[in-house]
Image (cartoon, rainbow, N blue to C red):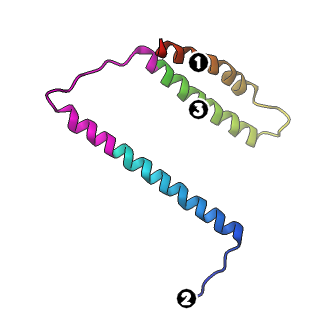
Amino acid sequence: MEEIELTHDEKIARSKKQMMWFGIVSLIMMFAGLTSAYVVSRGRKDWVEIELPEEFFWSTGVILLSSLTLFLAKKAILNSNKKEPPYLQLLLLYWEAPLFLCNLQALIV
């Protein structure tokens, strides 16, 4: 079989991609381990149910909304004619940051 010689930049890109996949697989394995530990420990007699504060759910919603908004803003920038910035998405991001910080402060207090 004939070997193909890669350039330095191609080798760097290939090694970065491989390390990214190692990171993704390790995160999946960690999540699976924590999930199985939760399932097993939940059946124990000394398990204590903890109620999450309402602010946790609001904070999670704000994080998801800001991620979606950032994704849509980036997509609009890449697909637009570069003359009109995505004002709506940028405005939403501008208002989501203080909302997130207020929820974070409510969780700490």
For the residues marked 3 and 1, what is the alpha-carbon distance in whole angstroms?
Answer: 15 Å
Residue at position x 33%, y 41% from top? 34
Residue at position x 66%, y 18% from top? 95
Q: Is 40 colored magenta in this rendering?
A: yes
Asked which secondary structure carries label 3, the reply is: helix
- Residue that carries the numbered disc 1 in the rendered image: 101
Instruction: Give whichever of discs 2 and 3 has the lower sequence position.
Output: 2
Does residue 5 appear left or right of residue 40 in this picture? Answer: right
Q: Position of residue 36 (x, y in %)?
A: 27, 42
- Residue that carries the numbered disc 2 in the rendered image: 1
Asked which secondary structure carries label 1, the reply is: helix
Q: Which mark is residue 67?
A: 3
Q: Residues within 10 Å of mark 2 (few under 14, many from 20)?
A: few
| Tags 1 and 2 touching, CB below 8 Å | no
Residue at position x 82%, y 40% from top? 81
Q: Is residue 18 above or below residue 95?
A: below
| Tags 2 and 3 touching, CB below 8 Å | no
Does residue 82 appear left or right of residue 12 in this picture? Answer: right
Does residue 72 appear left or right of residue 104 in this picture? Answer: right
Quarter placement of the N terminus: bottom right
Asked which secondary structure carries label 2, the reply is: loop
* Region rendered in magenta: 33-57
- Tell me the kind of residue under disc 1: Leu
